[in-house]
Every structure is written in structure tokens, then in C-alpha cells.
Image (spheres, rainbow, N blue to C red):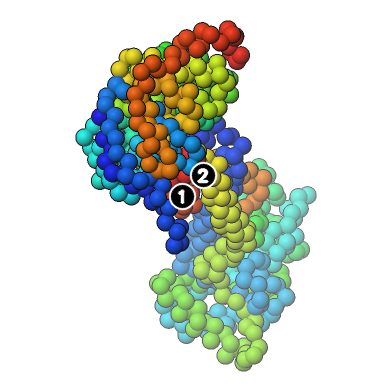
Amino acid sequence: MKILRTASEGLESLAANKLRTCFMMAGTVVGIAALTVIMAIGKGTEAQVMRRVENFGPRAMMLVAGGGRTIGPPDASVATLTLADARAVRDEVPGLEIVTPQAWQMGAGLRFGGNQSKATMWGIEPEWHDAWNWYTVEGDGITDEDVATMARVCVIGSSVKRDLFGDVDPIGESLYINKVAVEVKGVLERRGVAGASGGDFDNRILLPITTAMRRVMNVDHIGGVRIITSDANRMADQAEQITRLMRVRHRITPPAEDDFRINSPLAIAEVVRGTSGTLTMLLTGLAGLSLLVGGVVLMNILLISVAERTAEIGLRRAVGATRRDIFHQFLTESLSVTFLGMILGSALGWGVSLAIQRWTTMPVVVSWEPLAVAIGFALLIGTFFGVQPARRAARLNPVEALR
Amino acid sequence: MIELEGIEKTYTRGDVVTRVLKDISFEIHPGQYVAIMGASGTGKSTLMNILGCLDKPTDGHYRLDGTDMVELDDEDLSHLRNHKIGFVFQQFHLLQRTTALKNTLLPLIYADRYPEEAEELAEEALAMVGLSDRIDYRPSQLSGGQQQRVAIARALINNPAILLADEPTGNLDSRSGAEVMSIFQRLHRQGRTIVIVTHDRELAEHAQRVIVLEDGQIAEDHRISQPRDAEAELAALAPAEENVG
């Protein structure tokens, strides 16, 4: 086909001017590489959001004492949230499946025989197991009776079992938590995932909430309330109701800020996305700028090349090239440059993504999708910035070109 | 068969109208070897561009093998050049980074049908101009005379109706020039139609017929009874080695 022959004329010109070709390609390479990394980070972030939300519970909310921060370990020093607040939420906000208060203390000291360790202590009610969908694999969970009687019992996470008991069967053994002796009645199933704060989820010890508040921590307030809604679509509305209720109960009026916060999958997704947002924005800027500047450079080099090769174009016209043939030749040069740049840029972006995955905690998912986007961009830029020079070449008057 | 009838070419710049060609009419029959001669500014380049279908006359008709090029659009003119015309330029106009073979087959790239045996055709054309041993050389590795011979091979590859040469020896030393002229005479003996455009009367006298342009008009049109013999002139020159190899 004639179009292939004229295209191959364009390719030969690129091959014959390698340095020029490199300059023409540079912007596309950088731009496409940045684009590839952006997409890898975007995909990684979304995967992490999904994981976190799945982990948190898609229908779950947390009413947490203390305002301000949206994520991270609760602030134990805020003493405003009480069991009565939890009851009020349960009684007054409709459409909630589970409302269960929890008290907690980070880094509670544990001892069994000669072994010591630290773990997060949770004071819970039995519904906690349902609210977190997290049950015991050995022994039993916390019961209503345990709560009512302020029983000196506990359920331990698999990390606590490993650290304190080793090969010893912990069920029925007593351990000390902040110098209070409690009997181990169950071991939690291993979750094996990091929490939102990056800690070991399995390094925990559960006590009846009454035992935790009275006997261990000696406090009247709780850390938070775990809430499961029966309808995820009503979550935003319910969060609004809870906020109003809590502000009334805590006598907060504007302009005072909430002394609590409500975490939801939406809030978590926002936080996770926020961490990679800055880098993504920077890379987007870099990609946009590179592609634009690269395109302009490409166009200018092509325009210079058209001027330099006036005689060549004149000769080709004299031996029978039509305007369209010349147009095709120069458009082929432009498209080939961006296409080659796209391949190199994708490879570079792929490498950088793998490096980020390997050496940073940034969530990155390397996939083939960015290649499709890159091909689209390469064609777009090659055409957009190639048409003008190609048209100029095609319009040259052969008589003047040959002079 | 070339027929020019009342060819006019005028250029208008602002209010100034310049008549470059005035009522040019002549015919060139197949197999003729014609020189168009004139000093610079007499319109011979313009005439050559029209003969080569690179430019259209302002008025008049130019029929090439029966096709009136005046009625054709740019694309059809490109096809016409591709099929019917072989150009040889003073500056050779070879693609610098390309081999003699590839330069020679360039017109085939723009043909409607690319012959499978394109490379063999190019090799044959190069053999005709005595460059069989240079097919893989680039222009920079060839002497001026050799470069012009590649250009002649390129002009021949499409088996054109006319070979149109514009000052073909203008950039060559006398020996290379004589070589080129002897190739033209040989091609003429093989039946080619050749038109050379030159300001040089001696060169023009290698042809059978000389058309002299003066001030855009035909001043003379006569046959040369005894054309100069390029072979003999070449033999008379002191033998020289090919300077570039």
C-alpha cells in the first residue's frame, strides 16, 4: 500500500536523525511515565480504600470521644463520652442494628508468669463480637453475665497468646493486666491485618466493659461506640442525627466544635485518598506539563525539519508525491515519535511504579490499564502537534521548494 | 508527444504585471533531443517548470501524450509527473542519508502500484548509467558526476515520456559533464525523448534541435545538422581516474 510506503519514508527519516528523534520524544516519555505512575498509585489507593472499608465494615460507624483528628487511635484523655451516650444513641436514632460501647487503653501492661508484653485493652459488651464480626476460635467470648458481674475474665488476641503463653494453653490461665488478675476464657480468631493506625490488630485483650472501666482503668467514660446500621444508604443521615443528639447531650452550641467524631467508611476513604493526593497532584502537573511542552517541542522540531528539508520535499513532489503523500510522511514521523515515546514512557512508569511498590509504603497496583490510556495520549499528541507541520510540508510549492 | 500552444505566464505583484512567457508554441516529437536555450531571466526556468508539470501556465495549452495538463488538479499533476516525467536537476537533489539504490527507486514509492521487482529495476537503471558497483553508496561517498548519474537513473526508473534536464552539467567539472552528456546521447540513440534546459550554447549543441528563448519569446528554433559528439569530447579530454570511489 502506498500509505505504508510513505509512512516508511517517515520512519527512515527518524532512524537517520536519532538525536533529533530523542529530543522529539523526551516530553512524551516523561509525560507518559508520570501518567503511568499516577494510575498505578490511583489504583493502589482505591484498592487500599476497599481493604480499609472492608476491614472497618461497610455498614459500620464509630462514634469516638474527642474531636479534631479524623483517624488514628482514640484520645483517651477525653472524658466526655459515657455509657449513657451510647444508650441514648441506641434508643433515639432509628435504623441501627448494633450500638455497642467500648472503652480502651493503648499499651496496657500484661504479665503471665515471667512473660510481659503490652497490648491494647478493650472493654466491651458481647455485641462487640457481632459488631466487628470477630469471634473466638478457642474458648468463649464475653457474655452479658460477665458484663453484669464485672467478671475478672478476658479474651486475648492471637499475638497476645503467642507473646505471653507461647506453647501453653491459655484457656483457664490467669494473667495480670495493670496488676489486676483476669482469667483467659477465649482466644480471638487471627485477623493478621494492620489497623488504620498501622498497629497489630491481633495484639489486643478484651475485657467486659464494666471490668475494664471499674477495675482496670477506674474511669466513668468510654472511648467510643461502635455502630452498625441496617441500611448503608442511610448512614450519612444517621451520622447527622447522632451528631445532633451528641451536641445536645454534651451541651455544645456554636461556635464550639464537637467533642466527638464519627468515623465512617466514607471518612476513612477520604483519609486514605488524601495521603496519596498530594503526590498524585504533583505527578498530574508533571504529566500535563511534560505532554504539553513535549508536544510543542515536537511540533517545533518538525517545523524546523520541514524548513530544513524543503528541497527534499520539493524533490519528492517532483518525482510524483502528492500533497497527501507528504502529509502522511510527516504525520507518520510525529505519530511514530509519540508512539515510541509512549512505549519508553510506559516502561519507565512501570519501573518507577514497581520501585515505589518495593521501597515505599505507598499503595501501588501495577496493571495494564495505563498502557491503554498511554496509547490514547500518544495518538492524541502525535496527531495534535503533528498535523500543523505535516500540513505546512504538504502545502509547499514544489517550484519554490526546488529553487 | 509534447504540444505547447500559446503558453503565457504572467506574475502579478501589486500593480506590476510581469509577462515571463509570451505566446510560446512548439511541438516535440517522441525520440527528439531538444535543448531549450536562453540567458538567465529569459523565462527558461519557468518554461522548464511548466514542461515538468510543476507549474501551470496562465494561459494556453500544454498536452503531454494527449493529456492537457492545464485541466488537471494538483493530485493528477503529481501522478502525471510520476508517470511521464523524469527530472534531472543542476543540484542533483539526492536524499543525502540514502543509498544510490534507494534514491533511484524513489519515484516508484509514489507510483500507484509498487513493482515487486523495484530493486531490480533500480539496479538496471544504475547499470545504464554505469554505476552497478555503487548501488550501496550514499551521495556523500560519490563524486559529483556519479551523483548526477544516480539522478539520471532515478529519472529513468519510471520509463518516462520525457527526460527533463535543467542545467545538468552546471555543477560538474568538464569531464563529469561530458560523461553526463554522453549518457544523454546514448539514451537518445535508444529512443528517449530528452529536453535539456541550459544557458550554454556549446552544451545545447549536443541536441538535435535548439529552441532559443529571448525575453519570454521563442527567438530561434532550429535543427542542429551536426550535433556535438559527447563521446568524442570525452575521449579528447585527458584521461582521469575516478576521483572518489
Q: Secondary structure at mark 2?
A: helix
Residue A155 percent coordinates (x, y): 60, 59
Q: Amino acid at mark 2?
A: Val
Is the residue A254 above or below the residue B7 in the image?
below
Q: What percent of the width, then of the height, locates residue A338?
A: 50, 44
The answer to which quarter of the image holds residue A253 is bottom right
The residue located at (73%, 61%) in the rendering is A107
Residues tagged 2 and 1 counted as in contact (Cβ below 8 A) = yes
Q: Residue furthest right?
A: A114
Q: How many marks?
A: 2
* Quadrant of the image occupied by residue A269: bottom right
* Circle 1 chain: A
Residue at 24% over, 40% down: B68
Residue A267, position in %: x, y?
55, 69
Mark 2 or 1, nearer chain start? 2
> What x and y, as percent, mark residue B25?
29, 39
